[in-house]
Image (cartoon, rainbow, N blue to C red):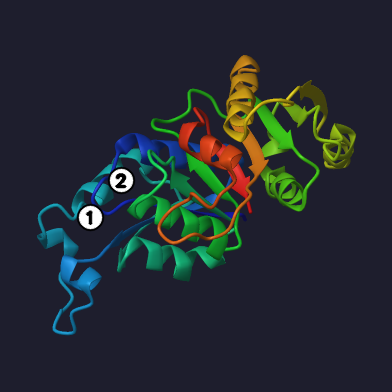
């Protein structure tokens, strides 16, 4: 069974985010671990005199709230677990994320700061694809998917990683940039066909568009297709505490995608 890891922020737990993660696991018949990392300010400062403190007893830690929300949402499902992790969010992603097939993260609201640093750790240090969840559970899951095909290594890895989702999707659209000579959609469509997934192709003209403009064009095409999943390769490398070292198109996608987005570096 495919294993999903969802890492939630210890200080900002939203019911809608847990609902979205559970819905993804149910749709794709996957096993879901919801990890709740928490570390005291003294831990973050690296003070040697710090001793472990039960996060349930610390105001603002969110552990009790997160566990309660998880139990309300997941109920008695056998394919989900709640795991409290003592430690920093980024450290938890680095040490635990490597043993999962897919890592889920909340969509970024900005391109720098603590959450961007955690996103980088998931994308570049686990080896797994990252499923970016927008705020709130998706209204549907498994109806229509859009694969952004660029003909690159990252694009190919993303396509392969998405197969467990795409085989359960009714309609798949392969979207390619007409200005990119490597982006032959027939290659992706043929691969999908061999996995029992029938797909159609669509071209958009990215000539003259900025990288962010191409991101907006892709999002527009996905919305017009009424898609509930996007798949793409991520360009860049692990920058310190920011995602500014991602390609500009990737930046736009991971901060603005209105539907779940599967990205692979």
Does residue 39 lie above or below 176 as drawn? Answer: below
For the C terminus, the image quarter is bottom right
The picture places residue 3, in percent across and down from the top left corner, at 56, 56
Which of the two residues, 4 or 260, is positioned nearer the viewer here?
Answer: 260
Q: Is residue 254 above or below residue 98?
A: above
Residue 118's x, y, as percent?
Answer: 41, 56
Residues 97 and 249: in front is 249
Q: Is residue 165 above or below residue 55?
A: above
| Residue at image coords 79%, 23% | 203
242 or 89: nearer the viewer: 242
Looking at the image, residue 243 sits to the left or right of residue 172; the answer is left
Picture coordinates of residue 239, whole percent (x, y): 49, 59
Judging by the rendered image, the residue that carries numbered circle 1 is: 63
Per the image, the residue denoted by label 2 is 71
Residue 206: which quarter of the image?
top right
Between 227 and 119, the one nearer to me in the picture: 119
Quadrant assignment for the N terminus:
bottom right
Q: CA distance from mark 1 to mark 2?
A: 12 Å
Residue 54 visible, this orientation: no
The mark nearer the N terminus, 1 or 2, is: 1
* Circle nearer the viewer, 1 or 2: 1
Left or right of 231? Residue 17 is: left
Q: Which residue is at 42% across, 41% downward?
A: 108
Residue under the point 41% across and 51% down: 116
Image coords of residue 181 (percent x, y) = 86, 36
Residue lying furthest front in this view? 208
Q: Is residue 243 visible?
A: yes
Q: Quadrant of residue 212?
A: top right
Assess disc 1: are there few (<14), some (14-19) or many (≥20) residues with their C-alpha within 10 Å of its C-alpha. Answer: many
Establish if 128 lies above or below 187. below
Q: Secondary structure at mark 1?
A: helix
């Amino acid at each position: 069974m495919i294993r999903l890891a969802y890492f939630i922020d210890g200080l900002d737990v939203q019911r809608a985010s847990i609902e979205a993660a559970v819905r993804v696991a149910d749709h794709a018949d996957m096993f879901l671990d919801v990890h709740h990392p928490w570390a005291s300010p003294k831990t973050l400062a690296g003070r040697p005199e710090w001793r472990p403190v039960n996060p349930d007893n610390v105001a603002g830690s969110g552990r009790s709230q997160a566990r309660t929300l998880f139990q309300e949402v997941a109920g008695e499902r056998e394919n989900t677990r709640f795991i409290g992790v003592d430690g920093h969010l980024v450290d938890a992603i680095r040490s635990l994320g490597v043993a999962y097939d897919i890592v889920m993260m909340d969509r970024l609201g900005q391109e720098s700061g603590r959450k961007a640093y955690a996103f980088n750790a998931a994308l570049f240090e686990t080896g797994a694809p990252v499923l970016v969840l927008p705020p709130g559970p998706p209204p549907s899951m498994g109806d229509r998917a859009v694969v952004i095909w660029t003909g690159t290594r990252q694009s190919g890895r993303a396509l392969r990683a998405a197969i467990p989702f795409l085989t359960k999707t009714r309609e798949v659209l392969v979207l390619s940039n007409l200005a990119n000579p490597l982006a032959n959609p027939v290659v992706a469509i043929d691969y999908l066909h061999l996995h029992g997934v029938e797909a159609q192709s669509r071209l958009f003209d990215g000539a003259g568009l900025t990288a962010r403009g191409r991101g907006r064009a892709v999002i527009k095409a996905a919305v017009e297709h009424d898609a509930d999943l996007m798949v793409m390769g991520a360009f860049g490398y692990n920058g310190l505490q920011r995602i500014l070292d991602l390609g500009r198109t990737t930046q736009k996608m991971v901060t603005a995608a209105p539907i779940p987005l599967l990205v692979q570096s």
